[in-house]
Amino acid sequence: MRATVAALLRKELALELRTRESVPAMVLFTVTTYVIFHFGLDRNSVEGDLAAGVLWVTLLFAAILGINRLFVADHEQGGFDGFLLAPVDRTAMLVAKAVALLAFLCLVELVAVPAFALLLLGPSLGQALPELLVVLLAADVGIAVVGTLVAALAIQTRARDLMVPLLALPLLVPVVLGASQATSPLLEQRGAAALPGDWLSLLALYDLLFALIAYAVFDFLLED
Amino acid sequence: MSTTDPAVALHGAGRRYGERAALRNVSLELAAGRTLVVFGPNGAGKTTLLRMLATLLRPHAGEVRVLGHELPDDGYAVRGRIGFLGHEPLLYRELTGRENLRFHARLHRAAPARVDELLDAVGMRARADDPVAELSRGMVQRLAVARAVLHEPELLLLDEPLANLDPAAVAQVDPLIGRASGHTRVLTSHDSAGALPSADVVLGLKGGRVALLAGAADVSAEQIAQLYA
């Protein structure tokens, strides 16, 4: 399966490099949203709960843009049929798409997190950065797995653009909740507190749960 | 598959889209190495039949066996042995022809050298590094032919394979998908003059039902024309 995942992943990255449909749009969305928050909240800086909420809600909505585009090329250009005609494990597509979405989210965050620190965040990120990276990774894995599952389901419907947010947002509430709660102590004005292990564990558990669900049902989503 | 098993066997096969029956009670057998040509007006069920044989659609009634395996349960066993050329080329428009063929070669574990070999065979070496979106329909069809035979399949399922091809291109792809290729073939066509000479068995579909099934030697162009009346 590793070779198939590698082939699919290489194709995903080549398509994104060629079309630049997902990552640039997600980056632009996050930066614009932070600018809007900057003026909309009418304050120069945020910290703690509010900072964590603004960071994660923005990243979540940016992720929805990427989830919406995840299977479009395969659906519109026969990629599904091409894949289904090959003697390969269909789970390879789930893994490749989830890894591709995870990579897109990481790329977006390379710009989004510094932009957030610059435009909105009161306390310095320096001390909290290693712990924040752990939370970002745990939440991104959850968004990537749930997003891939939802995108595969929604692409089969006529109202794809509507279905993705309607399905993904409720399913991603625990991820945003866990990520916000785990991030909040890291962004306190008085200095970063310790990373709350229980919220991080919740995130990891949710990631694992949805990875198992996606593994169990993904084949059926590709079936006629 | 034993040597006496037919390459394709359908017994009472049917397929619906919602309430509408696209294919009803189709029964036929095709021996290995032979060519079945399917005629019929638009909406007769030709593409549905091909997609069902390609494991892309589940039969809703009857029995479908391909290369000795029952579908859909045994689909995995036949996928790598089928070459499918449908109305869509199954190529990503933003990738080049070479990138597309390499991608499919990796999925089918075909040798990388096979890509260049086929690009030469279909006369696309010079434009192999152009994005598919920038190619003419005929060129895309030639790449689609290369994609369909990349993994050296035993059974070719060809939906109007010569559409969009000029005579020179037809001559180029003929050794790959024509009668001389030696493959077992199921192909659809509207062109009785062009397709009938290459057929061993002729199937005529109308409204999803079998309207004609006979050896090619026993079928006249008039009988095929009646399918479209």
Image: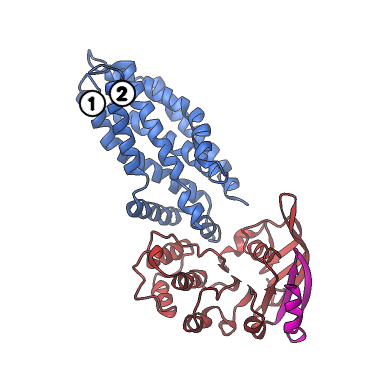
Chain colours: A blue, B red
Which of the 4 image quadrants contains residue A184?
Answer: top left
Residue A187, percent from left and from top: 27, 19
CA gap between label 1 and label 2 equals 9 Å
Question: Observer-nearest residue: B209 or B179?
Answer: B209
Which amino acid does the dot numbered 1 rest on? Answer: Leu
Callout 2 secondary element: helix
Residue B36, percent from left and from top: 68, 76
Q: Indicate which disc, 1 or 2, sits on the residue closer to the N terminus.
A: 2
Q: Say whether marks 1 and 2 touch (CB < 8 Å).
A: yes
Give me the chain letter of mark 2. A
Q: Is residue B207 magenta?
A: yes
Q: Residue at x 41, y 72 (%)?
A: B115
Q: Residue at x 71, y 49 (%)?
A: B18
Q: Is residue A78 magenta?
A: no
Callout 1 secondary element: helix
Which of the 4 image quadrants contains residue B119?
Answer: bottom left
Name the image quarter holding the C terminus of chain B: bottom right
Residue B74, percent from left and from top: 65, 59
Which amino acid does the dot numbered 2 rest on? Answer: Phe
Residue A208, percent from left and from top: 48, 34
Q: Which mark is residue A37?
A: 2
How crowded pointer 2 is (Cα within 10 Å; few <14, some 14-19, many 20+) is rated as some
Q: Residue at x 54, y 42 (%)?
A: A154
Location of residue B29 with respect to B106 vertically, above or below:
below
**Labels 1 and 2 positioned on one and the same chain:** yes
Q: Which residues are magenta?
A: B200-229
Location of residue A57 with respect to B67 vertically, above or below:
above
